[in-house]
Image (cartoon, grey):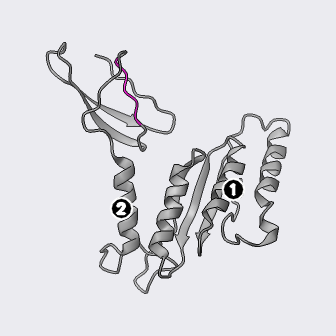
Amino acid sequence: MKQVDAFNEVGLPCYYDLHHKYLAKLRQIQSYPGNEDLKYGIGLESHFDKPNIPYMRGSLDTLAAAKVPIWLTEVDVTKGPKQVVFLEEVMREGFGHPGVKGIVMWVAWHAKGCYVMCLTDNNFKNLPQGDVVDKLLDEWRKVPEKPKTDSKGAFEAELFHGEYLVTVKHESLKEPIVQTVDLDSKSEAAIKA
């Protein structure tokens, strides 16, 4: 599926209906005979000057009606005194939207300088933009340190894709159960005692 340059030109009248047209085109493509079992997704180029967060949210809400994964791609914010603030707003809005399944940043480092936005300097020390990304990742990766199960022995957590070392302790066990759980987008982990 072609990417929509979704957020670059916010404010131009021709863009207000763009997402509805894109959704209609996607539904048209999905309706063609033989296309019902294809995998679909929406990639949204996400270059920002001054983000219009309500517009971003409305656009994501509209496109989420397609019920296909949405990825924010090429996320960056142009240089300026509020770059870090705007980056955090964009990242939080994208991460918090239930239709968004991933975020890819546009932060190409080059020894002669960044294209638009860098997370580190030439010595690979974090810049303020890198600090805000690290802060958000730390916040979003937090897993309860000592979670408790419910009355049925179940515990739920939203986690990033990846590998987790899980330890289960209970008075009925002779020793803790330690198990590695590998999660992808469709995983549900069950640990059996």
Amino acid at pointer 1: Ser
Say left or right for 137 vs 11: left
Q: Secondary structure at mark 2?
A: helix
Q: Residues within 10 Å of mark 1 (few under 14, many from 20)?
A: some
Q: Residue at x 70, y 50 (%)?
A: 63
Instruction: Write down the quadrant of residue 150 in the picture.
Output: top left
Q: Main secondary structure of the magenta part?
A: loop
Q: Is residue 139 above or below residue 83?
A: above
Residue 155 belongs to the span the image colors magenta? yes
Q: Residues within 10 Å of mark 2 (few under 14, many from 20)?
A: some
Residue 102 belongs to the span the image colors magenta? no
Can you say which quadrant of the picture contains the C terminus?
A: top left
- The single residue placed furthest to the left in the displayed view is 174
Q: Residue at x 30, y 74 (%)?
A: 125
The residue segment tinted magenta is 153-157
- The single residue placed furthest to the bottom in the displayed view is 112
Q: Secondary structure at mark 1?
A: helix
Say left or right for 152 vs 90: left
Amino acid at pointer 2: Asp
Q: Which residue is identified by label 2? A: 134
Work out whether residue 30 can be spotted: yes
